[in-house]
Image (cartoon, grey):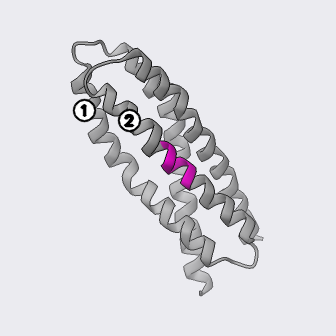
Amino acid sequence: MNDTLFKLILLSNVAATLYMVGLIWCVQIVHYPLFAQVGTEGFAAYEAAHSRLITLVVGLPMLVELVTAGLLLFFRSPAIGLAETSVGVVLVLVIWLSTISLQVPQHAILSSGFDTTAHQFLVNSNWIRTIAWSVRGALVLWMMAKVMR
């Protein structure tokens, strides 16, 4: 693979990951906790709007991150080892599995109306993604620094 294409893939991965790091911290600290303040009467409509709109905000960056993490696994620079790229892919898989198996089901419950148990589980389980994306953020910055040397 030529160096320019590799750097474009890495830069795309870094950009998508860092975008998601910032977003997940906002969701974890501000957005999800505020679900409890919406009120029960309008909550189902609020949750439906949230689910529709958040998909517009996270869909493309998550796909870019997934694809580019996979590409980096197979097309590496001599500066980046298999261990780093493998850890990066594992973290992306943890994020996707957590999203599909933990957060999406809680949103499905909340789509019928506010549920304290589902909300608390959503907030607590979202720490998995928050931590995984934060670690990925540090990892991709470290990988970028290694390539830039």
Q: Residue 126: x, y in percent? A: 52, 34
Density class for disc 2 (Cα within 10 Å; few <14, some 14-19, many ≥20) is some
Density class for disc 1 (Cα within 10 Å; few <14, some 14-19, many ≥20) is some
Can you identify the residue that label 2 sits on?
105
Chain-order first, disc 1 or disc 2? 1
Left or right: residue 104 compared with residue 11: left
Residue ID at (51%, 43%): 98
Left or right: residue 44 compared with residue 131: left
For numbered disc 1, what is the local secondary structure?
Answer: helix
Residue ID at (60%, 87%): 2
For numbered disc 2, what is the local secondary structure?
Answer: helix
Q: Residue 74: x, y in percent? A: 61, 77
Residue ID at (67%, 47%): 135
Q: Is residue 9 above or below residue 145?
A: below
Q: Which residues are magenta?
A: 93-98
Q: Quadrant of the N terminus?
A: bottom right
Q: Quadrant of the C terminus?
A: bottom right
C-alpha separation, residue under disc 1 versus residue under disc 2: 13 Å
Can you identify the residue that label 1 sits on?
48
Disc 2 residue type? Pro
